[in-house]
Amino acid sequence: MFRPRHLPTLLLLFVACLPWQDGHATEPEQRPVIAVIGTGRVGTALGPRLATLGYEVVYGSRSPERADVRSLVKATGNGASALSIEAAAKRGDWILLATPYRAMHSVLEQFGDLDGKIIIDVSNALKAADDGLMSMASDTSAGEELQAALPSAHVVKALNTVGFHVMANPAAAGGPVTVPIVGNSNSAKTRVTGLVRDLGFETIDLGPIRQARYLEGMAALYLVPYLQGRREDAFEFHLRKDSSPQESTGVRAAQ
């Protein structure tokens, strides 16, 4: 005989028997393998942190057997490894490009098929100017050049406006740090946003990859205190959100 007290058990049995869309119970998304291309200051800062978050890290290097690369792999731990650039790019689900802009195009020649892969671009197309500061080294940006060279991949510009020491330890900034993110794929930006927030940063989506030129300009501004020997003025970007006027008639054209 059915009694009301049996209802919770019956409901649980009913839910357990429901068909799932893919035939399996929903499970947490498996973390992607991240190929960190470059073992300089940026790669050395981000690789170990990604490993502590549970990502498998594979470093891509022209000389993966070099002593300093082996030491980085050991320090990273959590199953990290080092391969050639081509092999690392093939192994990684996502690619974090942590090379200087001047090396970007030669690195691209070593990539194989990157169809559908997410590429996190941390580079800046900058060069030294006559006045001792930085100027743009591209008519567009490193991010746009990368997307044009790899049209079947999803390039997301992120973390290019952050100091390597803050990448390694966000608390070193003494307060919140905002990471602007741009790219043509909304789904890729969403996934990279999750990673960047896991690293301890605030984020803001600022549009498609063509906006990368302005983010790289922000990096040129970031370097001014360092290049002028005014380290006491060094800063990290923090963009205060939710600051729109209470009433607005829309955005006026700039012309």
Image (cartoon, rainbow, N blue to C red):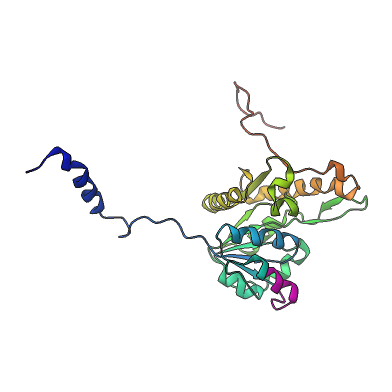
For the point 58% across and 53% down, which residue is it? 195
Range covered by the magenta-colored residues? 62-73
Seen as rendered, the residue at the extreme right is 131
Q: Is residue 217 above or below residue 145?
A: above
Relative side of 5 to 65, left or right? left
Relative side of 175 to 50, left or right? right
The answer to whether any part of residue 5 appears in the image is yes
Look at the image and say whether residue 224 sits in the magenta stretch: no
For the point 76% across and 46% down, which residue is it? 218
Q: Position of residue 191 (x, y in %)?
A: 54, 52
Q: Position of residue 152 (x, y in %)?
A: 56, 63
Seen as rendered, the residue at the extreme front is 5
Seen as rendered, the residue at the extreme top is 247
For the point 56% across and 71% down, which residue is it? 91
Q: Nearer the viewer, residue 94 or 27?
A: 27
Quarter occupied by residue 155: bottom right
Q: Nearer the viewer, residue 30 or 70?
A: 70
The answer to whether any part of residue 119 appears in the image is no
Q: Position of residue 141 (x, y in %)?
A: 72, 54
Q: Position of residue 177 (x, y in %)?
A: 69, 43
Relative side of 19 to 246, left or right? left
Q: Nearer the viewer, residue 131 or 11?
A: 11
Q: Is residue 36 above or below residue 137?
A: below
Q: Is residue 89 above or below residue 168?
A: below
Task: Quadrant for the C terminus, please.
Answer: top right
Q: Is residue 98 above or below residue 162?
A: below
Task: Quadrant for the N terminus, please.
Answer: top left
Seen as rendered, the residue at the extreme left is 1
Look at the image and say whether residue 69 sits in the magenta stretch: yes
Relative side of 143 to 151, left or right? right
Quarter occupied by residue 49: bottom right
